[in-house]
Amino acid sequence: MREINLDIYKNLRREVDESWINLHPIQRGGILPPETRETLLSFADGYSVCDYCLEGRVDLVKKPPIFDFADDVAKFLNMDEVNFTPGARGAKNAIFKAITEPGDMVVIDSLAHYTTYIAAELNGLKIVEVPHSGYPEFKIKADDYAVKIDEVKRETGELPASVLLTHADYRYGNLAEAAAVGKIAKSYGVPFILNAAYTAGVMPVDGKKLQADFLVGSGHKSWAASGPIGILATTYEFADKVFRTSTIKGPWSGRAFAKKEVFLFGCPPVFGAPIATLMASFPHVVGRVKRWEEEVEKIRWLVKELERIKDFHQLGERPRRHTLVSFETPSFHRVAKKHERRGFFLHEELKKRKISGIHPGMTKLIKLNTYGLNRDQLQKVADAFHEIARSYDIGVE
Amino acid sequence: MREINLDIYKNLRREVDESWINLHPIQRGGILPPETRETLLSFADGYSVCDYCLEGRVDLVKKPPIFDFADDVAKFLNMDEVNFTPGARGAKNAIFKAITEPGDMVVIDSLAHYTTYIAAELNGLKIVEVPHSGYPEFKIKADDYAVKIDEVKRETGELPASVLLTHADYRYGNLAEAAAVGKIAKSYGVPFILNAAYTAGVMPVDGKKLQADFLVGSGHKSWAASGPIGILATTYEFADKVFRTSTIKGPWSGRAFAKKEVFLFGCPPVFGAPIATLMASFPHVVGRVKRWEEEVEKIRWLVKELERIKDFHQLGERPRRHTLVSFETPSFHRVAKKHERRGFFLHEELKKRKISGIHPGMTKLIKLNTYGLNRDQLQKVADAFHEIARSYDIGVE
């Protein structure tokens, strides 16, 4: 065997522990509550939820109650059927596999997560982007979906195979007009996929009200789960299609796998830690979405505080309707240009104060998420930014 | 919201804890050593390994040392490049996506895991099965790969797009002649995929020696990881193909994702618990594969002990070269037919003795895995089976 230094894998620990204030935009919704950490340890081993698997599929396991859970998640999202996937990306891929053919057109918002583009690429789809309004709000207009659907119809003679909307985008945290897009999609009869990776699990989301044919969620992003695990919710109309079972047959052996869902890899690979933690956190999640308004108030407060710093401008829609937010920060960027640590100075200044989550090296535009932080913690964040600004002679109002 | 009973998700715990003797065929290689449980807790949150992600891809993260780790796993397997996937199934799917076209033929062994069939179905492939020798050994003959490759060539005018061999099969735990199949594949110039889900991580596997173009492993099955996580190892020759990056471009936005690996969903969804535990267990895994011969000795001992029970016959090759084993057990099946608990009686008798892992309801054929159990534990297993047999008037020699 070629030489390996095994010491670097011993005593692996994460530096950012609970004593830090973590603002990482993708991490806030995926922090496990204490009770889920206990469950995680209990189900730590690889196939831990398979002790009493009778049917060869993880979503049909009754002990622990995954079978009931899939149904309860469907109720919670007001959809008809749910299964789990290796990440929200896995859900989008499964949906495209089920309802499109290579060469088909799909209409997506231009703020979509990169995995939406990759899922389209994986399935040989052509994408049409609904534009956003550009600087500084970057908003998606629902009516532009109708414009793009008409365009596709005019150019190809056919409707797009699907339209996809990102409910809250990863970049500006804008909350899209999902109900309006759902209505437009319905009026054309085009299946509507709502990517709720940043919304379902942190705020109330009602799939039927939004007329979603498919609702995609992310356990590790927004359901306090130790993923990776995605949630694929759909209606009775599409369930048979997207959850269709295998039809392949061994030509010599005659082997067949009639229980296995083909677009979900047979038995979805979410057994063990992902599904166990998603279940354990469910009561916490059901409770917390009711407190979304408080979360919105807190981010609005922080935006006000950070905009007291010279040349800090919040990007995206105003006022905030989501806890993920971007700022352009040219004053900090000017500091970075002359600083010996360049763009890393900000990350390092925050690190000294045990505040993490601002992308290392970034000072032109910063992105953060306050979901679940309390007012004391946010005060500390505001104080830290003000202090750093002043220490580099940047004015604070 | 429709009514949900949240109480069933509170205090979720696994019944089968460390005080049990677990014989579950798919679980033995995925049990976390104590040091990895500590790491799991530290990296419990969703995107926990992304604190210092600079390049937007989990395998390029340097802290924790995932970047080094991918290289070290390649060394350990004697392959050139490695990345991680949502389960071994995800690796097989990515490989088929990269090196086949819909309608292509692939030659697989008739003992392949169902996910091999599903991966073929997902990619629109036609499968040709290499037969096994049938009852009682169910062996795959390496030379039959040449026969089937010739058959494909004769019938279609072309070589198959790939041949796949299951190194140790899920059913009988037969250890296939991988080197011989590798040699045949090489002589025809057909890419050779070795599914090492039940071998790499528990026993020594040398990819170059076996002439594997692709080696597929399973972290939760055989690398003591809290998955789901798969290992996709390949050679320089195929790395660019299977790890090729995205080329899609937003037609309006111009957005592109040149760093993201398209067949791996961009950034492979293995962040957090899966990759953290796979790393933490790596020193343990590197050590344990050297003790494979002891593991083989132990299973041979148990086979001898269980075959003392009337009508217990080990299936698959003899003597054992793997710790996963099946027995036909008609004597127990006769008991089940008259028992009020039917086939569940055996599972329940074992449960009383805190022995788990025999499929609930099965008595005609039972399957178990002894990997990592010590001699005392195996003695208890043998004693339990003997005791149960005698209590139902089944002879024990």
Image (tube, coloured by chain):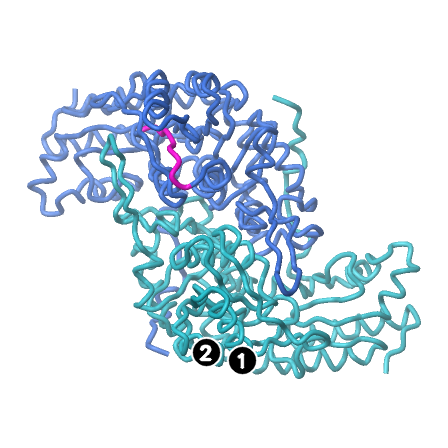
Chain colours: A cyan, B blue
Looking at this view, is B307 or A214 the one in front?
A214
Q: Which residue is mark 1?
A: A143
Q: Cβ–Cβ below 8 Å for labels 2 and 1? A: yes
Categorize mark 2 by other alpha carbons within 10 Å: few (<14), some (14-19), many (20+). Answer: many
Q: Residue at x 55, y 62 (%)?
A: A30
Crowdedness near tag 1: few (<14), some (14–19) or many (≥20) residues, C-alpha within 10 Å: few
Could you tell whether A277 is left or right of B393 in the image? Answer: right
Q: Is residue B350 visible?
A: yes
Boundaries of the magenta span: B102-109
Q: Callout 2: residue from which chain?
A: A
Q: Which residue type does callout 1 highlight?
A: Asp
Q: Secondary structure at mark 1?
A: helix
Q: Which residue is mark 2?
A: A184
Front-most of residues A65 and B62: B62
Subunit ID for the residue under disc 1? A
Q: Secondary structure at mark 2?
A: helix
Q: Position of residue B329 (x, y in %)?
A: 17, 30
Measured in 3D between alpha carbons, the distance from the residue under mark 2 to the one under mark 1, in whole angstroms, is 8 Å
Q: Mark 2 vs mark 1: which is more N-terminal?
A: 1
